[in-house]
C-alpha cells in the first residue's frame, strides 16, 4: 500500500516514500440534534461532511530498503513540492493504493522538521476534502415571471496523464483508481487495442472510476 498525491491540474505525482502506520477518512452526513418542546430531543440528517485529516510522513535522507521504489533520498525536494502545491491552492488527488480511496483534497500549511539528527525529515500534512462549487443557473417562472434558482449540477473532473518510460496501464490504474484490474476497461475507454502495449509520450484519458 502506498499513498500518492497527484496534482489535478498538472498531473505531477508525489509518491510518499513511507506509508504511515494508519490513516482514516470520513464519508456521509452529520447528524443534527434538535430540542423540541413537546417531544424532547430528536436527531435529523444534517449536511454532507467534508473530512479533515492530519498525517505525518517520514522522508528519509537516503534510499532505504523500506522506502518506496524510486525514492532518491532528497526529503526537502518533496517538502518544496508540497509547499508549492499548498501555496498555489492546488487541488490534489489523495490516493491510497489497494483501497478505494481516491479523493480530491487541499493541503493546509506544510509543517516539517527533524527529530534525531539523522537528516531524516518528518512532514505533517493537513488534508481537507475539496468540493467544487457547482455553477447555478436561473430560469423564469412562467406563472409569476420571477427568476427561480435551478438545482446545482455537479461538475465532472476530466484529467489525463502522459505515459513515461516504465508506465503500464495496470500501474496507472493502481495509482489513479487504487485498482490495477481496471487496466482493460481504461484501455477500452481510450481505444487501446492491447492493454499491455502503451508508449512514452502517449496521452491516456482518465475518466471517473464510476464510468469505467
Image (tube, helix red, strand yellow):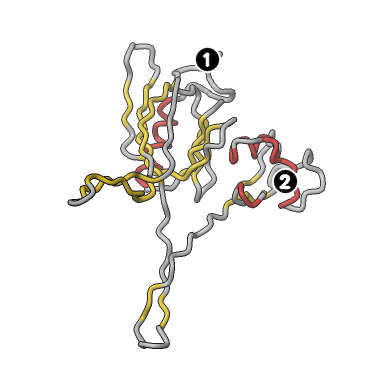
Of residues 160 and 26, the one drawn nearer to the viewer in this rendering = 26
Q: Outermost residue, left direction?
A: 37
**Sequence-earlier tag: 1 or 2:** 1
Q: What is the number of the mark on residue 188?
A: none
Query: Image point 33% across, 49% down: which residue?
Result: 44
> How far across and how far down the image is residue 74, in percent?
46, 25
In front: 94, or 59?
A: 94
Q: What's the residue at 64%, 36% (across, down)?
A: 179
Asked whether, in this view, residue 197 is left or right of residue 121, the answer is right
Rendered image quadrant of residue 28: top left
Question: Against 57, is 150 above or below?
Answer: below
Camera-near label (1 vs 2) is: 2
Give residue 163's position: percent from left, percent from top: 67, 43
Tell me residue 194's x, y (percent).
81, 43
Q: Is residue 180 above or below residue 140?
A: above
Position of the N terminus, as image quadrant, is top right
The reply to whether the C-beta atoms of the residues labelled 1 and 2 are less than 8 Å apart is: no
Is 28 drawn above or below residue 191 in the view shown? Answer: above
**Position of 78 compared to 195: left or right?**
left
Res 53 quadrant in image: top left
Measured as percent of width and height from the top left, residue 122 is found at: 37, 22
- Residue at 36%, 81% in the rendered image: 147
The answer to whether residue 102 is above or below residue 137 is above
Per the image, label 1 sits on a secondary structure element best described as: loop
Mark 2 highlights which residue? 185
Measured Cα–Cα span from mark 1 to mark 2: 35 Å
Closest to the observer, 50 or 34: 34
The residue that label 1 is drawn on is 64
* In front of the other: 141 or 94: 141
Q: Callout 2: few (<14), some (14-19), or many (20+) C-alpha neighbours within 10 Å?
A: some
Q: Which structural element holds mark 2?
A: helix
Amino acid at each position: 500500500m502506498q499513498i500518492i498525491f497527484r496534482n489535478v491540474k498538472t498531473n505531477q505525482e508525489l509518491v510518499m516514500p513511507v506509508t504511515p502506520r494508519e490513516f482514516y477518512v470520513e464519508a456521509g452526513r452529520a447528524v443534527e440534534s434538535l430540542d423540541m418542546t413537546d417531544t424532547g430531543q430528536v436527531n435529523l440528517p444534517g449536511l454532507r461532511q467534508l473530512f479533515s485529516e492530519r498525517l505525518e510522513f517520514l522522508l528519509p535522507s537516503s534510499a532505504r530498503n523500506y522506502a518506496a521504489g524510486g525514492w532518491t533520498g532528497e526529503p526537502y525536494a518533496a517538502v518544496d513540492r508540497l509547499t508549492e502545491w499548498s501555496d498555489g491552492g492546488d487541488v490534489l488527488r489523495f490516493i491510497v493504493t489497494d483501497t478505494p480511496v481516491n479523493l480530491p483534497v487541499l493541503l493546509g500549511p506544510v509543517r516539517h522538521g527533524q527529530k534525531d539528527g539523522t537528516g531524516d525529515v518528518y512532514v505533517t500534512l493537513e488534508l481537507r476534502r475539496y468540493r467544487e462549487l457547482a455553477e447555478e443557473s436561473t430560469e423564469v417562472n412562467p406563472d409569476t415571471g420571477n427568476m427561480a434558482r435551478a438545482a446545482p449540477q455537479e461538475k465532472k473532473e476530466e484529467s489525463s496523464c502522459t505515459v513515461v518510460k516504465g508506465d503500464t496501464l495496470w500501474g496507472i490504474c493502481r495509482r489513479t483508481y487504487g485498482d490495477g484490474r481496471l487496466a482493460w476497461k481504461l484501455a477500452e475507454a481510450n481505444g487501446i487495442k492491447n492493454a499491455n502495449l502503451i508508449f512514452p509520450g502517449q496521452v491516456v484519458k482518465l475518466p471517473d472510476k464510476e464510468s469505467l
